[in-house]
Image (cartoon, rainbow, N blue to C red):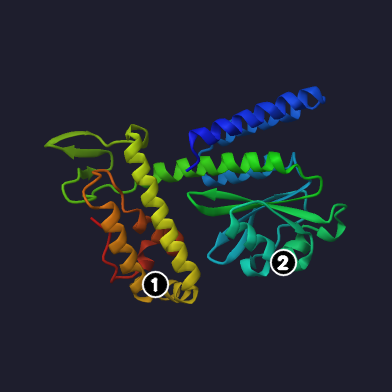
Amino acid sequence: MISDQILEQLKALVEKEIERGARQGAGSAAEGLNQTIRRLRTAEGESDVTGLLSSAAAAYAKRIACLLFETDLVKVATFRGISSAPAPFLIHDSPSLLSAIESHDTVVASATARELSEALFTATESSTLTEPKAYLVPVVVHGSVRMVLFAAEEVQPAFLEIICAVAAQRLEAMELESAFRAVPNHALQHDAPQYDAPHLVQIGGAHSASPKWNELDAAEQTLHLRAQRFAQVAVARMRVDRNDAVREGQQRGDLYSALRPEIDAARNEYKSQFLNGQSKTMVDYLYLELVRSLANDEDRLLGSGFPGRLT
């Protein structure tokens, strides 16, 4: 998760750019960036973040495309300054995109079909660029690349990196809030508060509002973040190392049978690290990540043999 310290550094950088822009007669553009950051930090959903990201980025590059992933397939969510959306293509068809995903850092690539993929090169009309290079800026959410911003022609990379960092921060916050609310009607662990209804939690026989993310202390929040990162890394490793098994499990509606050794090992490790009594608010983030990342938000695809949420 992006820390308050990093956000303060981003804020300082924005203020510096505004000050410099004002001296150069471009203060309005920098102020526009500040407004975009405020809007990103109050976005209500991922589609809002994606839309704001691409529209804001269009002020700092002439050609923009926001790239999302479904397993190893790349799709364009939004775009600006190009005539049509690129057709879906495989991640491995684009070495520069793969590099951005693996490094979690901005990649400056030659604007060629070999580097970008034939689909991205053609759709973004890269053959007509006056500057034959492209930038790929990853949006890293809890240690995983959620999307990548493609930019070409008159690119101002410092501004793009700022808005991508703020977009990541908002996506992290939304994901944590959603995950923390996602386990009603379930005892999350032995001796943990029993969720009797979506918005109630029983503690010592009395009912009170269930704890919210911002009500957790710093140590508890840190533990939740560690647990979520563990889940994301474990599931990402399954997706990369056992991609054929993932596809087979999705097609058969039985991911558990296809990935049983990996899922069981991850469940055992998760239970040992995070469901060992140190937290009464812990969520089975591993289950949530399996459903989100492998089962396309349909828990039935885990299969009838899946043991269920960890407790």
Q: Is residue 12 above or below residue 291?
A: above
> Which of the two marks, 2 or 1, is nearer to us in this view?
2
The residue lying toward the viewer, choosing from 30 and 79, is 30
Question: How far is disc 2 from disc 1 in space, using C-alphas?
Answer: 31 Å
Q: Position of residue 238 (x, y in %)?
A: 44, 68
Residue to which mark 2 is pinned? 117
Secondary structure under tag 1 reads loop
In which image quadrant can residue 280 be found?
top left
Is 278 situated left or right of 41 in this image? left
Residue that numbered label 1 is attached to: 253
In the picture, the disc for residue 97 is: none
Measuring from the top left, give residue 145's x and y in whole percent: 55, 54
Label 2: few (<14), some (14–19) or many (≥20) C-alpha neighbours in 10 Å: many
Q: Earlier in the sequence, mark 2 or mark 1?
A: 2
Foreground pick, 14 / 117: 14
- Mark 1: which amino acid? Gly
Which residue is at 48% across, 72% downward?
241
Residue at (40% x, 41% y) in the render: 177
Judged left or right of residue 147, residue 276 is left
Amino acid on which disc 2 is placed: Ser
